Image (tube, helix red, strand yellow):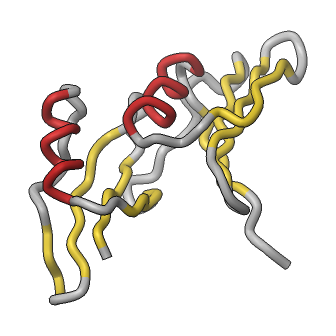
Amino acid sequence: MKFCWSTLYVKDLDESIQFYEGVIGLPLVRRFNAGEQTEIAFLGSGETQVELIQDAARPGGNVGADISWGFAVDSLEQAFESMKEKDIKLLSDIIQPNPHSRFFFVEDPNGFKVQIAQI
C-alpha cells in the first residue's frame, strides 16, 4: 500500500491553486469538474499529491488546528524571506527543535497550517 494524496476542501480553488503552485511550487497535474457544484484539482510531483476540492455543499471545509502539511526546501532562510515578500501569513518564526531540523509555519488561503522545513 502507498500513500496517494491528501485532500483539503477549499473556499476558492483558483486562489488555492495559486498558493500551492505559485508559492509552494507544486505543479498542477489535473483539474476537472466532478458534478455541477464541485471542482477538483491535483497538484504535486512524485507519488504523493495534494487534492483540492471546491464544493458548494462544503464551502471552505473544515481545517483542524492540529493538522498541517510539511514541505521541504533547500534554503529555509530563502523560503522564509520569499513568504514575507509574497505577503503570506507567517504563523511562526524559524524553529529549530534539534540540530538536524529547522522549520516555520505559514497559513494557506483557507486557514490551513503549512510547515516549511529544511531537514
Count of marks placed on residues = 0
Q: Residue at x 79, y 13 (%)?
A: 37
Identity of the residue furthest to the top in this view: 36
Quarter of the image where one finds residue 93: bottom left
**Viewer-closest of 18 and 65:** 18
Q: Residue at x 48, y 44 (%)?
A: 63
**Viewer-closest of 51 and 55:** 51
Horizontal arrangement in the rendering, residue 65 relative to residue 91 (left or right): right
Horizontal arrangement in the rendering, residue 42 relative to residue 83 (left or right): right
Horizontal arrangement in the rendering, residue 50 relative to residue 106 (left or right): right
Identity of the residue furthest to the bottom in this view: 99
Identity of the residue furthest to the right in this view: 35
Residue 87 percent location from the top left of the image? 19, 26
Q: Residue at x 76, y 31 (%)?
A: 30
Residue 15 percent location from the top left of the image? 48, 19
Residue 113 percent location from the top left of the image? 36, 49
**Quarter of the image that includes the C terminus:** bottom left
Residue 98 percent location from the top left of the image? 17, 88
**Quarter of the image that includes the N terminus:** bottom right
Quarter of the image where one finds residue 90: top left
Identity of the residue furthest to the left in this view: 93
Q: Residue at x 39, y 28 (%)?
A: 109
